[in-house]
Amino acid sequence: QLQASGGGLVQAGGSLRLSCEDSNHTVGNYAMGWFRQAPGKEREFVAAITWTGTRTYYGDSVKGRFTIGRDNGKNTVYLQMNILKPEDTAAYYCAASQNYVGSRLSGYNYWGQGTLVTVSS
């Protein structure tokens, strides 16, 4: 079961680090993704990483500001978010995929509960 954490309230320009842990200790077997959903908007792709961690992918709105990483030994995936903007305010979700890595929501098999990020101006 995936569980995202690390959300909170931060001022614009600040940073947060989200974590996604798997209680079943299987994160290392999957490609992982982060998505977000703002109120009244569709869920959108943020970042993804292959199971080896050798390749990463980012949505255009977060490139250069967010970094996805993983520690398979700790069954954890991270999302380092820097230079946060008010438009980054959303619930952030982590997801796992057995055979896909990328931006399509339908490519992911498992989803965790979201963690809320609020960026004040």
Image (tube, rainbow, N blue to C red):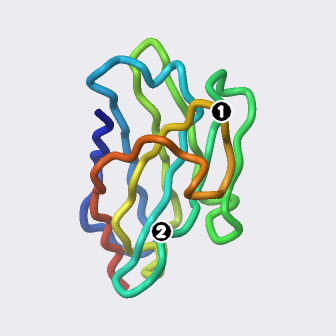
Q: Is residue 120 left or right of residue 104?
A: left
Q: Nearer the viewer, residue 61 or 113?
A: 113
**Disc 1 packing (10 Å; few <14; some 14–19; many ≥20):** few
Residue found at x 28% / y 56%: 115
Name the amino acid, label 1.
Answer: Asn
Q: Are marks 2 and 1 in contact (CB under 8 Å)?
A: no
Q: Report the disc number at residue 84.
A: 2
Q: Position of residue 48 (x, y in %)?
A: 62, 45
Q: Is residue 37 left or right of residue 83?
A: left
Picture quadrant where residue 99 is located: top right
Residue found at x 26% / y 24%: 23
Instruction: List the residue tagged with mark 1.
Output: 99
Q: Nearer the viewer, mark 2 or mark 1?
A: 1
Q: Position of residue 85 (x, y in %)?
A: 48, 76
Picture quadrant where residue 69 is located: top right
Q: Secondary structure at mark 2?
A: loop
Q: CA distance from mark 2 to mark 1?
A: 31 Å
Is 41 drawn above or below residue 20 in the view shown? below
Name the amino acid, label 2.
Answer: Leu
Is 117 drawn above or below residue 89 in the view shown? above
Q: Quadrant of the C terminus?
A: bottom left
Q: Is residue 95 left or right of residue 19?
A: right
The mark nearer the N terminus, 2 or 1, is 2
Q: Position of residue 40 (x, y in %)?
A: 37, 87
